[in-house]
Structures are given as structure tokens and as C-alpha cells.
Image (cartoon, helix red, strand yellow):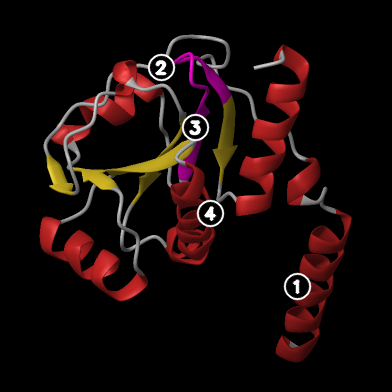
Amino acid sequence: MAAIAVGVVVALLVVLLATREPAADRKSTSQLIGQQAPAIGGEPLLGDPFDIGATDRWVVVNFFASWCVPCVEEHPELVAFSEEHAETGDARVVSVVYSDKEEDVLDFFGRFGGDWTVFDSDQGRTALDWGVARVPESYLVAPTGVVVAWFVSGVTQTELNAVIDRYTQETGS
């Protein structure tokens, strides 16, 4: 009897997963899209101080935690994006800690790489200003300071570059 119940549950789970819309097709919206990016508070745990209002390049603002499995899975994509754009200087990554311990964050970057600025959580004020509800969440900010994209549950280097290319073609900048 128990084997039948387990079989039914597994079958339902397979059907549910098979009929879900692919992640690439899901559209995420945020009230920040089209708005000036909020400030990033807190102190840098890693990297140099950074003012999002004083930049002339693309910025990926990534909210993460070391305990977050999707954050660990996403991290190599952010490293690849950062390394690709370090050569041209047209984009950078900035991370904001979400409900995590400093020593765990430092260990995370020591193990998985990434040489960008990482801000402490400033008691969650920055996450609140950006409307972050869960991690990972990333926002892509244009050189004008306007938020142009929001990614929930992870982002890839390809997705970030596609948004930059599309925005650049649409605006001519």
C-alpha cells in the first residue's frame, strides 16, 4: 500500500515538473524596472567602496547568501560575466549579502571566486529598498542608472549579455 502511495506521489511530481514552463520563458517583473536604481547601503566586506549612482557602465546587483543552493549554482555564471567584462570595462558585478554571516561570505568567495565588491546586509535595508524577497535575485542596471532587468532564482552570463545587447540595440547606446 505504501509503495503505491509513493508511486502516485512520484508520478504526480513528474507530471508537475514536465508541464512547468521553462525558467527561460518565465517573465519576472519588478516595480524597479524603468526606475533609477536605489542606493546600496552597508559597508564593503570585499572589494572597493562603490556608488551605483556614480558609474557609467552596466552593473549587476546580485543579492545572495552562502547558504543558498541556487546562489552557489549561479555564482560561476557571475564570475564568468565579471571576467568577460573586466576586459572591456563596460560592466561589473556587485553583490549584497542577504541574511548571512560575514565569515561564511568570506569563505564563499574564497572557495568559489569573484573579485567584485560585496556589501554587508546593513540589517536588510538595501534588500528592502530593492524589494528583495528571496535569494538569489539580481538586477541589471544600465549605465544611465536605470534598472532594466530583474532575475529571480538565478541568472546566467548569456541572459545578462542578451539583455545588454537588446537594450543597446533598442536605445542605440
> Contact, CB < 8 Å: mark 3 with mark 2?
yes
Label tally: 4
Q: Which amino acid does label 2 sit on?
A: Ala
Secondary structure state at the residue bearing disc 4: helix
Residue that appears at 86% across and 62% down:
18
Res 37 label: 2
- Relative to the observer, which residue lies in front, 84 or 23? 84
Res 84 label: 4
Res 9 label: 1
Residue 112 visible in rendering = yes
Q: Earlier in the sequence, mark 3 or mark 1?
A: 1
Residue denoted by label 3: 139
Q: What residue type is labelled 4?
A: Glu
The CA distance from mark 4 to mark 2 is 23 Å
Residue 62 visible in rendering = no
Residue that appears at 71% across and 13% down:
171
Q: In this view, does 57 lie to the left or right of 47?
A: right
Q: What residue type is labelled 3?
A: Tyr
